[in-house]
Image: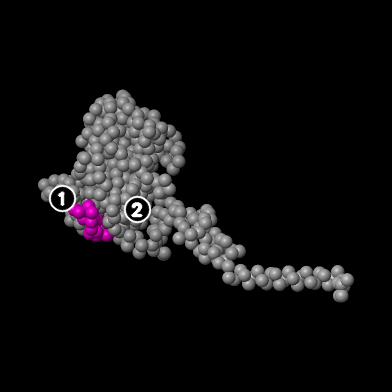
């Protein structure tokens, strides 16, 4: 028997009172309930000019993850780690290359070497290093704000003058660790920059040859591939950007100074010096410049084509141009063009060969090497009747440098060297494979 019988209304009030007490208790508990959560998110990459200029250092040899451009000087190789720096490799024995050190350079994509001086870009700046001791590269000079914008393989960046930072169109994965209460597990973090966010469980023999002699100003200069944006000639370093060619006086190798700017037009990609001329690849054509006066290159002509990606190499009276269609390179078909250069003021197409998706290329004598769905080799004794010799499909080739019987090849899966003393039967000498951070 109930001493104080309840009416339906009293029961409802009691229920509400108990619910309020329970809610109050939960609030009290929540104030004392904390947890640490780790987020991984993607955001557009940016770096302040201060961080950019304090990030230079020489490190022990590092594994290759995303290799880019390739350069060779004497017995040393220089392989770009895209936007991060340069691998220095002793290649005195091509069958056993020795990784020596890694030069960390934020925003680096291109380089050139003369004597003991390495020139490299760092987003907006041009750097000159003394590399006489590859284990302890020394910064000699920084030319600030040499390049206001840039691009490599369709990934663009530019300098935000107001915020004093470089903003890159590439995306990076970043990790955020935050303390939060038990109910708000995302800590109010939405990923930022429109990026995707995921939640994880929380826990915490050295030296180089001498520099250039006065008799031959190009002595001691290295060799780049067909995808290069840097080139050395006489006492000048030429660096092509999206629309210009920037000239730097390197008469005093360790003290580069800005000399001039030559407007090239839109979509500039590569530069290839040959003889007293410069051959500049763009998305719409090949520009030919007379470089008789190295301080003031003069345009002779332009070999035009439909919008495609366009590296070029030259041998004698012929230029070989790979045109890649699709993606950021425009429509149409992929092909290899052979261009007649007998009259540099009026280059003309001689013949086109169908390709799959070509990138860089190189030529040595009668042998042509093309990065196209792997590596293809051709007998180029007769440019109008190229005959394919071999096709290596098991590699991801980006660019090549044929040099004294050894083919240097860089690709997304690593660095390869081949003996091509017999062009019909290339012999693999060595491989430095890429190692993915998540592998």
Residue at image x 54%, y 64%? 35
Determine which residue is flagged by label 2: 84
Left/right of residue 176 with respect to residue 426 in the rendered view = right
Is 355 on the left-hand or right-hand side of 297?
Answer: right
Q: Position of residue 272 (x, y in %)?
A: 27, 42
Q: Which mark is residue 211?
A: 1
Residue 219, x across and y down, in percent: 16, 45
Q: Is residue 437 magenta?
A: no
Q: Read off the magenta span.
A: 127-143
| Label at residue 245 | none
Work out whether residue 134 can be spotted.
Answer: yes
Q: Nearer the viewer, mark 2 or mark 1?
A: 2
Front in this rendered view, residue 280 or 205 = 205
Q: Nearer the viewer, residue 238 or 426?
A: 426
Which of the two residues, 50 or 323, is positioned nearer the viewer here? Answer: 50
Which residue ends up furthest to the bottom in the rendered image? 4
Quick check: can you spot residue 315? no
SS category of the residue bearing label 1 = loop
Report the residue that reaches farthest toward the left: 215
Q: Relative to 14, is 383 on the left or the right?
A: left
| On-image quarter of the N terminus | bottom right
Query: Above or below — where is 331 with respect to 43?
Result: above
Q: Quadrant of residue 74?
A: top left
Q: Is residue 127 above or below residue 410?
A: below
Which quadrant of the view contains residue 366?
A: top left
Upstream in the sequence, badge 2 or badge 1?
2
Q: Is residue 125 above or below residue 110?
A: below
């Amino acid at each position: 028997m109930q001493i104080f019988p309840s009416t339906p209304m009293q029961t409802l009030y009691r229920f509400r009172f108990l619910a309020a007490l329970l809610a109050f208790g939960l609030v009290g508990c929540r104030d004392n309930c904390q947890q640490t959560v780790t987020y991984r998110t993607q955001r557009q990459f940016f770096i302040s000019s201060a961080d950019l200029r304090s990030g230079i250092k020489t490190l022990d040899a590092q594994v290759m993850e995303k290799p880019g451009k390739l350069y060779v000087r004497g017995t040393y190789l220089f392989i770009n780690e895209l936007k991060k720096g340069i691998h220095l490799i002793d290649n005195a024995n091509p069958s056993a290359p020795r990784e020596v050190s890694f030069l960390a350079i934020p925003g680096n994509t291109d380089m050139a070497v003369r004597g003991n001086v390495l020139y490299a870009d760092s987003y907006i700046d041009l750097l000159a290093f003394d590399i006489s001791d590859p284990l302890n590269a020394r910064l000699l000079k920084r030319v600030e704000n040499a390049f206001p914008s840039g691009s490599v393989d369709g990934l663009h960046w530019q300098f935000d003058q107001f915020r004093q930072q470089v903003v890159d169109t590439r995306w990076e994965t970043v990790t955020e660790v935050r303390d939060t209460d038990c109910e708000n597990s995302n800590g109010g973090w939405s990923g930022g920059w429109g990026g995707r966010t995921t939640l994880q469980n929380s826990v915490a023999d050295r030296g180089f040859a001498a520099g250039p002699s006065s008799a031959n100003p190009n002595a001691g200069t290295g060799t780049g591939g067909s995808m290069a944006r840097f080139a050395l000639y006489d006492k000048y370093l030429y660096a092509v950007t999206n629309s210009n060619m920037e000239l730097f006086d390197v008469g005093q190798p360790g003290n580069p100074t800005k000399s001039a700017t030559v407007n090239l037009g839109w979509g500039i990609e590569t530069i290839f010096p040959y003889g007293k001329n410069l051959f500049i690849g763009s998305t719409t054509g090949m520009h030919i410049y007379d470089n008789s006066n190295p301080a003031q290159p003069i345009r002779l002509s332009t070999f035009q084509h439909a919008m495609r990606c366009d590296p070029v190499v030259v041998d004698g009276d012929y230029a070989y141009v790979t045109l890649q269609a699709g993606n950021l390179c425009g429509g149409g078909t992929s092909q290899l063009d052979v261009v007649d250069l007998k009259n540099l003021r009026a280059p003309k197409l001689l013949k086109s060969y169908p390709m799959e998706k070509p990138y860089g290329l190189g030529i040595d004598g009668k042998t042509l090497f093309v990065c196209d769905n792997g590596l293809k080799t051709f007998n180029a004794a007769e440019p109008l009747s190229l005959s394919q010799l071999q096709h290596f499909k098991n590699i991801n080739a980006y660019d090549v440098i044929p040099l004294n019987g050894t083919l240097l090849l860089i690709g997304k899966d690593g660095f390869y060297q081949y003996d091509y003393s017999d062009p019909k039967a290339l012999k693999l000498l060595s491989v430095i494979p890429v190692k993915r951070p998540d592998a």
